Amino acid sequence: MSTKIPILDIPKYHADEMLGRVHSFESFGTVDGPGTRFVVFLQGCLFRCKYCHNRDTWDLDGGQLYSVTEVVEQILPYAKFMDASGGGVTVTGGEPVLQPHFVGLLFQKLRENGIHTCLDTNGYVGVYSDEVNHMIEQSDLVMCDIKHINDHKTALREMRSMVDSAVKLLKGNGALEEFGEMLHEAWMIKRSLSDRITNTAIDSIYSAARSAGAIGGKLLGAGGGGFMLLFVTPERHYLVRERLEKLFKVPFRFENGGSQIIFRNSVL
């Protein structure tokens, strides 16, 4: 990889009108730093991680141009919500370090308005510059994503191989109970990857459910909260409910509509 980061060809005006390439905004992020956060996804990244969640941010020429002022105006209506939760603004991507001048000026303006700033980066800085140093100085928090999975390749490949098997089962090629067994196997593999995957409370719930007849299960959700999903055959539902009577049961159903917009904020 080149030791010099290509600078995106973005017009420069006076400070408030410095332009940056923005992929998208998220007004209520809960997994991108402390508290409730307004997340700015910038456009452009040099890495090509196979497990990247935002591949559409790779293109250096994509996205839409926004001035620092325009982005700040998007953020300010949410300032009270961020402040109440101890949150702020996270700039991620893509890779923010590709646009250090823009990010530094944006963070400077946000901090002038009392808003906490967080830089989410892969940590690759080919050439340090005044703009990079200013960006770091204006960052209240830096989250560095370290891409290192070599120690868990076997486990991760095993989990990936389960996807095809699960699809076949859901299409009717095998007993549905096997899907529950696969959930259990995947959970046991996943919890072996890190001591932060689960805790004693979650382990106690899962163990109690299994002893009452649940075949398998997994956690749903992120950011320190969520639900325990359990696979239980119909005749054992009441046994699992009795064993977990202190927990709140959330009914759900499957639907075929796919992703749908359930809330739209006209501010964005």
Image (cartoon, rainbow, N blue to C red):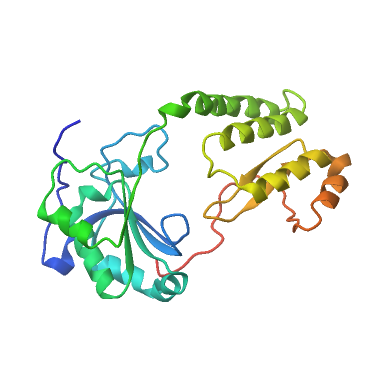
* 171 shown above or below 203: above
* 163 shown above or below 42: above
For this view, does 25 lie left or right of residue 229?
left
* Total labels drawn: 0
Q: Quadrant of the C terminus?
A: bottom left
Residue 255 in view of the camera: no
Residue ID at (41%, 66%): 87
For this view, does 53 lie left or right of residue 218?
left
Residue ID at (23%, 49%): 97
- Locate residue 244, reporting x and y percent: 79, 52
For this view, does 137 lie left or right of residue 39?
left
Q: Quadrant of residue 38?
A: bottom left
- Locate residue 108, reporting x and y percent: 22, 67
* 61 shown above or below 100: above
Q: Quadrant of the N terminus?
A: top left
For this view, does 121 lie left or right of residue 98?
right
Residue ID at (33%, 71%): 115
Q: Is 133 or 265 nearer to us in this picture?
A: 133
Q: Is 54 or 120 nearer to us in this picture?
A: 120
Q: Quadrant of residue 189?
A: top right
- Locate residue 76, reporting x and y percent: 35, 73
